[in-house]
Image (cartoon, helix red, strand yellow):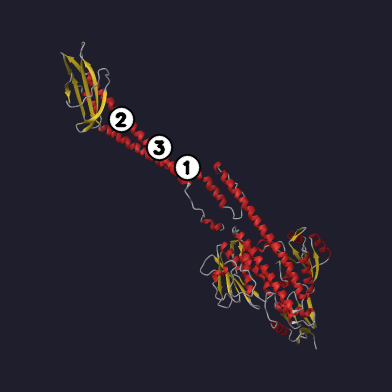
Amino acid sequence: MSGRRNETSATTARGSIRRQLFVQLLAVAAILSLAFFLIVREVAGRVAEATQDDILAASATSIADSLRFEGGEVTLDLPYSALSMLGTINEDRVFYRIVADGRTLTGYDDLPQARPSATAPRPQFATFDYRGDRVRAVTLLRPVGSGSTPVQVAVSVAQTRLGMAAISARITSIATAIGVGFFVVATALSLLAARSALSPLARMTLSVTRRGPADLRPLRTAAPRELVPFVDALNGFMARLRTALGQSEDFITEAAHRVRTPLATLRAQAEVTYRKLERPEHRQALREMIRAIDESARSAGQMLDHAMVTLRTDSVAHETVRLDELVRETCDRFAPTAGLKDIEIVTELPPAPVVLAGDRILLQNALHNVLDNAVKYSPADSTITVRLSAEPGAPRRVRLSVADQGRGFDGRDLKQLTRRFSRGSNVGDIVGSGLGLTIADEVARAHGGHLDISENSPGAGACIALVLPSA
Amino acid sequence: MRFLLIEDNERLASAIAERLRLDGHAVDHATTLSAARECLDAAAFDLILLDIMLPDGDGRQFLAGQRRARNAIPVIVITARSAVSDRVSLLDLGADDYITKPFEFSELEARCRAVLRRRGGSAANQTSFAGVTLDATRGSLNTGRRIETLRNRELRLLEVLFNAPGQVFSKAQLMDRLFSFSEDVSENAIEVYIARLRKRLGGTDARIETVRGLGYRLVGPR
């Protein structure tokens, strides 16, 4: 209920904005990384291919330039440089074929040759499988000879693509590394972004949880525009709650006043009349009336107390309370009431101060109710022992026990006694509402403690203890 | 004792006043705070009984004002408000004690006595008979040879007898003084207390005499 019970949230979390934001940012980062990788690989592949094509074309041109036409024959002095420029690339094998008038002049007979048209004398590139390897080939058409009918010579140069594949693999691995690196950096940035985007929310949560339970002032933390409606709604809710709580307290106070004042008048008049009555039957009747007045006053009082306690336990103020002083004061306050029955209240307090964090008024009311019970059920000329001590076997816990010499509980199920309006089985002749122990129990639990009900020994009185955490 | 009763509910006030007068006290009644201030200026009181909600102001402010003005008359607040909301602040404001409506007169009496005892008592509350002095505030009995501390019920019973020596009190009358309305006791229960008082008064000239069929009375030396 109070500050310390806020540790477990009553709301079940459904989805997380931070996770959602993070996952979305991550998905975008993944897509970008992949696209980057694909583009780099594609562009690098094309650049490598273009480079190979340029060299192939240069090689073919160099061969074509060395073609001569001598004595009606096309001759070729194959320049070494034409092939060596290709050989610089890796371990690749190089093939060539020079065809003049449909007859292979030199080179590999079976090297497939594109059929370039005479009208478009640009080099033709092709990729195909040849002798067990993938090759890139270029075919160049060059007219050789003079006169009106030059001989069309087709020069083809082909090269395996091992070097290309190696370059492409290297580029791919670099592209992969960059892509992965990009993704990792994007992940970290996404985490940061998700966190910083939600930090105003965390700040607001902190400023709400840090305040005291009774603090219902509006929230003044600066909020991002998107959260302003939420903060406004929260502030509106707190304002309504403040009004409602105030009205409840006012109502209880007013109700107490309205109920108690006429009862007080009635009781005072009845007592005055009683003193003047002589006949035993009249006196007996008036006694019954006074008892009924007491009963209703008591019930009304305890119900109002209970309502006030319930209202306050929802917002237990954790101020520092000197429990030993509180016990002494409350017992002193109670002494005259107990004295009417010649009941002595003996207090046994530890020499050192006992301090705990809690609500003074609630604790006082709890002890008051327990003492009230004890006095009510104690016979005349008896003793009530109020003892404040460390709880045995539980460090940082104190036990405030009230033991009387009354009738005890006659073996009744003790757990039931703290239920509202539940009373012992052997109380027929005593006025009571059954709320006293309920109030004490609720106060104990609001402080993180509990009420311990036991019998001194059957028929030898009750022992009610408030077990509370000490500071 | 002289009481100043500050209470705006006329019927409740007159019942309280009448009940206190039956016990032999003098009571002045004020229905407003201004009337109460006039009373305080005009006479000396032993105790103030103060209601909280009054037509012309809050009793708590009156109380705080009295304390600021160093008026030391003991104050018992009669409150109808919830115990949980009010009790602490009353004592903090300088009330000597408080009692919640409705109350039993014997409890009010006991609280008055306790307050006066804490304040040091007053000689006015001593009654003497046949060389024996009863101090009702301190709850002690001075027999001339020794001082005895009386238990609450012994004191209340002896007070009745000391206030009217020679008068016969029936068992029923005496029981009214000793037992609350919630207690069911037989008339013989009074005999226990009479026996105790006779023991207390042993060796003095004061005696409690049984008047057969009528009750008891306090008598002096034969």
B58 with respect to A92 (left or right): right
Identify the residue under disc 1.
A193
Looking at the rendering, in which quadrant would you find the N terminus of chain A?
bottom right
Nearer the observer: mark 3 or 2; the answer is 3
Label 1, label 2: how far apart the Cα atoms are:
39 Å
Which dot marks residue A32? 3
**Residue A163 as seen in the image, left or right of residue A236:** left
* Residue displayed at 73% across by 65% down: A262
Vertical relation: A134 (above or below) B153: above
Q: Amino acid at mark 1?
A: Ala
Q: SS class of the residue under badge 2?
A: helix
Which x, y percent locates residue A297?
Answer: 68, 67
Name which quarter of the figure residue A98 lies in.
Answer: top left
Q: x%, y% of residue A160? A: 23, 31
Residue identifier under label 2? A48
Please report whichever mark, 3 or 2, sits nearer to the chain's N-terminal start: 3
**The C terminus of chain A appears in which quarter of the rendering?**
bottom right
Vertical arrangement, residue B102 with respect to residue B198, above or below: above
